[in-house]
Amino acid sequence: MLTGIGEMLAIAVQMYRLTEERVPGGVVECGCYKGYSTSILSIACSLTGRTLDVFDSFQGLPSSSSQHYRPGQFAGSLAEVKEHVTAFGRPDVVRYHPGFFSESVPKRQRAPIAILWLDVDLEESARDALKLLPDLDRRGTLFTHECVPEFFDADGHVSPRGGPDDVLAPIVEAFRGDGRDIHGMFLTGNLGACRDRQAGLPVLPQPILLRLLALALA
């Protein structure tokens, strides 16, 4: 478990918000490690009538020029992830797409996406995964890991730091390339949320989210 309860709650709450607003599409997860987030999000998907498509190499990170991450890091086998989702989630709504994103993403049959959840660690992995962005509904939300508050200002502008470990720079480029004006915000843990500034449905800000988390754990 590398993602936290608050991060999963933020994504689940937004899923319910998008459902209330009748935003179509499934949830796509890129990078699942051992299936913690997959298990939680599969329950939320089951309750909201959505599917969860999971993209992962199931053999860890690819080779890169990163000085922080190493090839094979964060590896969880497909069998291991399925076992965890069966024990703790709703396996009937989950579909798996094994392989590095450069191989698996182009094979996906195009379909609407309501939430795109990236936990990919590397700049190049983000670029490959973001080929899914055109299918994200304009009202939908992209969530990404590897974020800190300093990457976002009060007006929602995103400030990538650059380099092989930066996933925000490819996100900004992908939004602009798809004709979307990106609005970003930090939520909790290492979670950031990005949406189309004009059409995207706002995400609950961190203070409200943390209050919900406190009530949920009370």
Image (cartoon, rainbow, N blue to C red):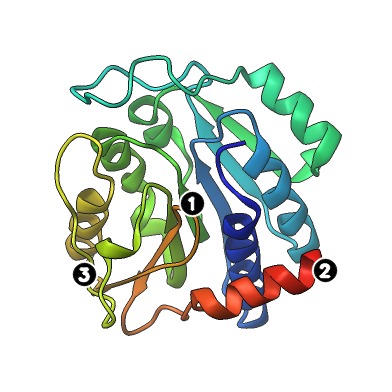
Q: Is residue 152 left or right of residue 113?
A: left
Q: CA distance from mark 1 to mark 2?
A: 27 Å
Residue 130 percent across, percent down from the top left: 32, 47
Q: CA distance from mark 1 to mark 3?
A: 20 Å
- Amino acid type, label 2: Ala
| Circle 2 residue | 218
Q: Nearer the viewer, residue 139 or 190?
A: 190
Asked which secondary structure carries label 2, the reply is: loop
Q: Which residue is found at the position 24% from the left and 38% from the top? A: 123
Residue 78 percent across, percent down from the top left: 63, 20
Q: Is residue 119 left or right of residue 13?
A: left
Q: Which mark is residue 153?
A: none
Residue 140 percent across, percent down from the top left: 47, 69
Q: Which residue is found at the position 80% from the left and 62% from the top? A: 47
Q: CA distance from mark 3 to mark 2?
A: 43 Å
| Circle 1 residue | 117
| Circle 3 residue | 179
| 60 vs 90: above or below | above
Q: Which residue is found at the position 23% from the left and 55% from the top? A: 174
Asked which secondary structure carries label 1, the reply is: strand
Nearer to us of marks 1 and 3 is 1
